Amino acid sequence: MSADELVLKRLSTQQLDALIDAQNEIFADYIIPIRSSREFFAEFMRSVGGKLEDIIVALSGDEIVGYVNPVVDGTEAWIGGLGVVPRMRNQGVGARLMEAAERYAEEEGAEEVLLEVIEGNLAAEKLYERLGYIPRVAYLSAEGNATQFAGFGQPPRRSHLENILALHERSYAGTCWQRRKRCALEESARTCEIYRNDEGFVLLRRVAGTGFIPFLGVDPEHGRKGVGTCLAKFAVNRLWELGTFKIAVYNIDDNDANRRMLDLFDFAVTLKQTEMRKRL
């Protein structure tokens, strides 16, 4: 069956397990292999403010062979996932799904669409460029060992979600979709310890022997004063106290200051992503 013969429809709740099966086939050979599940997918959808009923699937008969996950927030839309099963690739299925997602976004009032592509995923990058997406900014993910750190000054105090919302809005105003949206912060806060001082905040989480720092924000008025480094030192030390062996950070701006901070903690860059944008 060719791409033009496929039927594109909105996902029904009865198709959720079939979608997850399709995702596991799609991402088995991905740069970062992903194993999806109902719980994994539900957590992801909450973190980006997405709705299952907005997902568009490509059907060959009753089989899901591709999907796209558009999320609309005001005049912005974001593509929270695009995939095609291996046997249907290079036949225009991805382009059809993206065009359907863009039509949906425009109908919902979006004026631009954002997405992220992993460095090295050349097929996806070429597809997005053909569709008119332009690189905007790069983000890094990194990993390192947990370390007992001193020299972070007065420790930040334990806090709650409602006490960091304004700080988050200011400090993440110009960064990527997943970091600046309140729903992402709310989802992380469900399982994280939260700390703040007057200039910034940090979230941290331990899962088995791995620590995560999903958010670290500094009020722009206090930027470039060492606040972020002190909060990072505290977070690394706290995760060491909790018994973690490895620490991961995701989607931080690729700039000189953050590169220097990663070097300070001896963290190695594991992934680079580029945010691309298209005006509708």
Image (cartoon, rainbow, N blue to C red):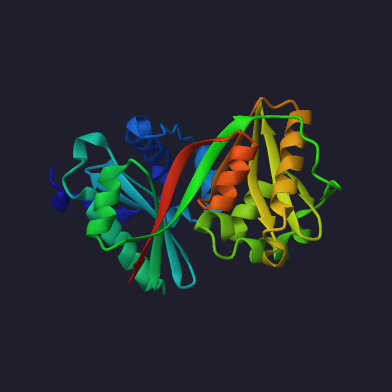
Q: Quadrant of residue 247?
A: top right
Q: Is residue 149 left or right of residue 253?
A: right
Q: Residue at x 67, y 65 (%)?
A: 220
Q: Is residue 109 left or right of residue 169?
A: left
Answer left or right for 49 relative to 114: right
Q: Identify the residue at horizontal 86%, vertical 48% (top origin).
A: 154
Residue 123 appears in the picture as rendered = yes
Residue 191 in sight: no
The percent position of residue 26, horizontal first and vertical second, equals 33, 36
Give percent across and percent down for residue 101.
Answer: 33, 60
Q: How many marks?
A: 0
Name the foreground residue: 247 vs 114: 247
- Residue 133 position, x and y percent, is 31, 61
Residue 275, quarter of picture: bottom left
Q: Residue at x 52, y 53 (%)?
A: 255
Residue 110 lies, with reference to residue 80, above or below; the image says below
- Decide which of 263, 254 is in the foreground and name it: 263
Q: Nearer the viewer, residue 174 or 47?
A: 174
Vertical order, 119 against 72 (above or below)? above
**Residue located at (70% from left, 41% from top):** 204
Q: Position of residue 98 (x, y in %)?
A: 29, 57
